[in-house]
Image (cartoon, rainbow, N blue to C red):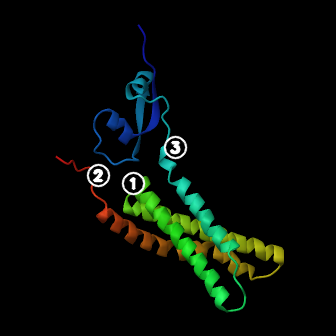
């Protein structure tokens, strides 16, 4: 006579309920469930972890780095001439392309909701702005120039100043994409 040991674990209720044939709940809801070793074999799971819920971070961090690289690597000529305009336009277009790709990745590949898509895109932009402000602070410290108080404020102001408009634009774009995308749940008979 063997008794199954039951262990409490945090699990994704959407996958737990899908395995039981009920999939009408929102994904990414976590709650404490009691599982036994037999349950893991029943559901076809051997490892219950949350790594899939942080898949969006794989998009946020690289896109934030793109914004940082564009801000640091693209030259900004000091004389206001045609070359300065061209370099700034190239930087804006590169960032706009990265922003559009990020929204498309979140919407089409990760199937995120419009609000979640906008949040992830805005976090990426804010992360890039914070990294650029940190780079400006490091440059000011090494070069001995700049107003340190204003540069310290830039660590807080730049992410807000770029993240909020990015959220609004991404929300509008993702909502428009959600209206255009055909419903995945509809069955064609």
Q: Which residue is mark 2?
A: 184
Secondary structure category for the residue under label 3: helix
Figure label count: 3
Mark 2 or 3: in front is 2
Q: Earlier in the sequence, mark 3 or mark 1?
A: 3
Residue located 31% across and 32% down the image: 20
- Callout 1 crowding tier (Cα within 10 Å): few <14, some 14–19, many ≥20: few
Secondary structure category for the residue under label 2: loop
Measuring from the top left, give residue 48's x and y in whole percent: 48, 34
- Callout 2 crowding tier (Cα within 10 Å): few <14, some 14–19, many ≥20: few
Q: Which residue is mark 3?
A: 51
Measuring from the top left, give residue 189's x and y in whole percent: 16, 46
Q: Is residue 160 visible?
A: no
Q: Earlier in the sequence, mark 2 or mark 3?
A: 3
Instruction: Tell me: residue 26, above or below residue 8.
Output: below
Residue located 28% across and 38% down the image: 22
Alpha carbon distance from label 1 to label 2? 10 Å
Q: Which residue is mark 1?
A: 111
The quadrant in which the N terminus is found is top left
Alpha carbon distance from label 2 to label 3? 25 Å
- Callout 3 crowding tier (Cα within 10 Å): few <14, some 14–19, many ≥20: few
Dot 2 and dot 3 residues touching (CB under 8 Å): no
Measuring from the top left, give residue 40's x and y in whole percent: 43, 27
Residue 118 placement: quadrant: bottom left
Secondary structure category for the residue under label 1: loop
Dot 1 and dot 2 residues touching (CB under 8 Å): yes
């Amino acid at each position: 006579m063997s008794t199954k040991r039951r262990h409490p674990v945090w699990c994704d209720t959407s996958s737990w309920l899908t395995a039981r044939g009920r999939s009408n709940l929102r994904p990414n809801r976590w709650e404490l469930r009691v599982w036994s070793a037999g349950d893991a074999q029943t559901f076809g799971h051997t490892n219950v972890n949350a790594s899939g819920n942080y898949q969006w971070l794989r998009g946020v961090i690289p896109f934030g780095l793109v914004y940082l690289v564009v801000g640091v690597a693209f030259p900004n000529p000091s004389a206001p001439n045609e070359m300065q305009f061209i370099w700034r336009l190239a930087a804006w277009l590169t960032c706009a392309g990265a922003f559009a790709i990020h929204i498309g990745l979140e919407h089409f590949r990760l199937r995120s909701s419009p609000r979640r898509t906008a949040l992830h895109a805005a976090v990426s932009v804010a992360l890039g702005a914070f990294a650029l402000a940190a780079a400006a602070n490091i440059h000011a410290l090494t070069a001995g120039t700049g107003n340190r108080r204003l540069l310290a404020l830039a660590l807080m102001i730049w992410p807000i100043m770029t993240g909020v408009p990015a959220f609004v634009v991404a929300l509008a774009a993702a909502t428009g994409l959600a209206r255009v995308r055909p419903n995945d749940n509809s069955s064609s008979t």
